[in-house]
Image (cartoon, grey):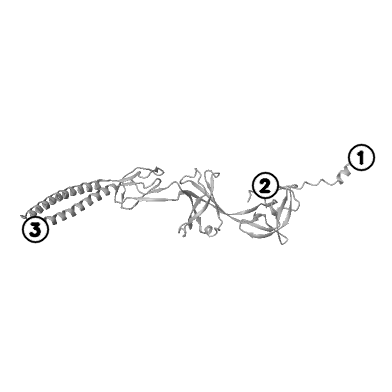
Amino acid sequence: MKALAWVLIALLTGCSKPAPAPEPVRPVLSVEARPISQQSLGRFAGNIQARYESTLGLRIAGRIARRYVDVGSEVEQGTLLASLDPTDQQNNVRASQGDLARVEAQWINSQANARRQQELFDRGVGAQAQLDIALTDLKTTRSSLEQAQAAARQARDQLGYSELRSDHAAVITRWQVEAGQVVTAGQEVVTLAQPDIKEAVIDLPDSVVDQLPAGVEFKVASQLDPAIGTLATLREIEPQADRTTRTRRARLTLADTPDAFRLGTAISVSISSTIATRIELPVGALQQADGKTQVWIVDKQTQTVVPRAVTVASRTDDTFVPGSGVQPGEQVVTAGVNSLTPGQKVKVDEESPQ
């Protein structure tokens, strides 16, 4: 009997069906459909510059003897910045002073001679011709004296022009010459920036400039610390693009100026504009099935997916705007869509928000 029981148990066990294998859980990437009202036009690098800059040069030619300040130095009005070798100017001053002394002596003699001839003429013992000659000599010497005085003043001015001084409080941003270099009159020597008014400066591609709408918004942030930032408005943009880079320089007026925004600070500028509220999704979420366009929606409670037919209102190389079929807050699969089946369990990893 025992043997028969074991045979029956073996037969029953062989006839039973094996337990079905659990459905595999497929990992997918997804993103939450979020309405957006700002369109990004890109992020660009730039720096903080002074709104007002001036480049100074010397009024006379000569050899740079010394530079007294370095780039980055703050200077006050009248600060000595650089000087020429003053030897030639000093010699001119000495020569003009010698000429002036000689003409002054002639002027004194001419005055004395004119007085003497006038006294003789008044007493009736002097000739009119001699008086006329004395008066003419007096006028000529007077003209020579004025000319010598002007030459002496000019020589002193030329000596003063051998020194380059700041005409306002500023920060030195660039030197164009070195000590020992020979410069011409008016040649650019040093650039000064007024540090009280600063602005952001960026170079924009022609294609971006053409897309700038009226309500464009600029967000300026420090590259070292993105938490430090402010808003800005477009002040001016160059009318022509650079021939090499095909970019146009734009200058932005800052809404406020954080202390960290020093001259030369590296910044990043994000450009965006207000648009009609819409949802943007990666194009990887789209799938063509049975002649229709669909996306896969994740049921957050059951962690399963269902297909949803959608219409595409607009599309770029990277994103598309659904005209219908997707609601705000829904989780949309963006990668792995071609291997999904309705009701399939998935393991969701979220992408960064669009």
Say which residue appears at 10% left-offset and 56% top-offset. Answer: 131
Q: Which mark is residue 5?
A: 1
Q: Which residue lies most toward the bottom here?
A: 291
Q: Are marks 2 and 1 in contact (CB under 8 Å)?
A: no
Q: Mark 3 vs mark 2: give the one in front.
A: 3
Count of residue discs:
3
- Say which of marks 3 and 1 sits in front: 3
Q: Is residue 259 left or right of residue 143?
A: right
Query: Disc 2 residue type?
Result: Asp
At label 2, counting other C-alpha atoms closer than 10 Å, the crowd grade (few under 14, some 14-19, many 20 or more) is few
For marks 2 and 1 on the same chain, the one whose residue lies earlier in the sequence: 1
Q: What residue is disc 2 on?
A: 349
Numbered badge on residue 180? none
Residue nearer the viewer, 319 or 210: 210
Say left or right for 223 vs 75.
right
From where the camera sits, is residue 306 visible?
yes
